[in-house]
Image (cartoon, rainbow, N blue to C red):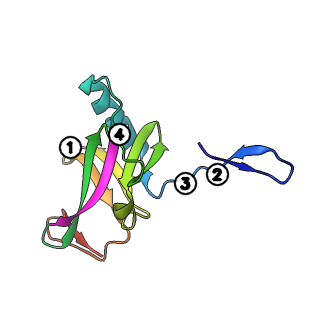
Amino acid sequence: MSTTTTELGVKTPDAVKAPPIELTDKAAAEVRRIVAEQNLPEKLHLRLRVVGGGCSGFQHKLDLDPAVNEKLDETFEIHGVSVVIDKRSLLYMTGVQVDFHDDLNKRGFSITNPSAKTTCGCGSSFSM
C-alpha cells in the first residue's frame, strides 16, 4: 500500500479507491462458496471483463482467476471477495451490479450495467 507524507512529515495511507462496481451480499456469498469448493492452494479472484461478442457487440464475463497483472488490472476487495477488473474493461463497468439469484425460475449470476444503451433479445450482450 502506498502512503502520502503530510506537511508535518506524518505518513498516512493513500485513500482506498472505491470500487466502481457493486457486488451484492448474495453474489459475494456464492463466490466464496464456489472458491471454497475448489479447494485450491492459490488464492482465486473474481475476474470481471467486457469482451467483444454477441449480437449487440459486448458481453460481460465472470471467471475465477488465480493471476493478477499489476500493470493491467485493478483489484478491489468487496464483501470479502477479491475482484479483479482489467483497466480496459473498467471503462465500461462504472455502476455495474453483480447479483446472484437462487429462485424457483432463475439460478445464477446476473450483471446489470446502467451504461448499456441496448441489449440483445436474450440479454447476453449489450451495446454502449
Dot 1: element = loop
Q: Position of residue 42 (x, y in %)?
A: 33, 27
Q: Position of residue 92 (x, y in %)?
A: 36, 67
**Could you tell me how far apart the alpha carbons at marks 2 and 4 are, in whole angstroms?**
22 Å
> Does the magenta-highlighted stretch encompass residue 48?
yes
Q: Position of residue 33 (x, y in %)?
A: 32, 30
> Does the magenta-highlighted stretch encompass residue 16?
no
Q: Are marks 4 and 3 in contact (CB under 8 Å)?
A: no
**Could you tell me how far apart the alpha carbons at marks 1 and 3 are, in whole angstroms?**
34 Å
Of mark 2 and mark 1, the one earlier in the sequence is 2
In the drawing, what numbered circle is on residue 18? Answer: 3
* Residue tagged 4: 45
* Residue tagged 1: 104
**Could you tell me how far apart the alpha carbons at marks 4 and 3 are, in whole angstroms?**
17 Å
Q: Residue at x 15, y 66 (%)?
A: 53
In the drawing, what numbered circle is on residue 93? Answer: none
* Residue tagged 2: 15
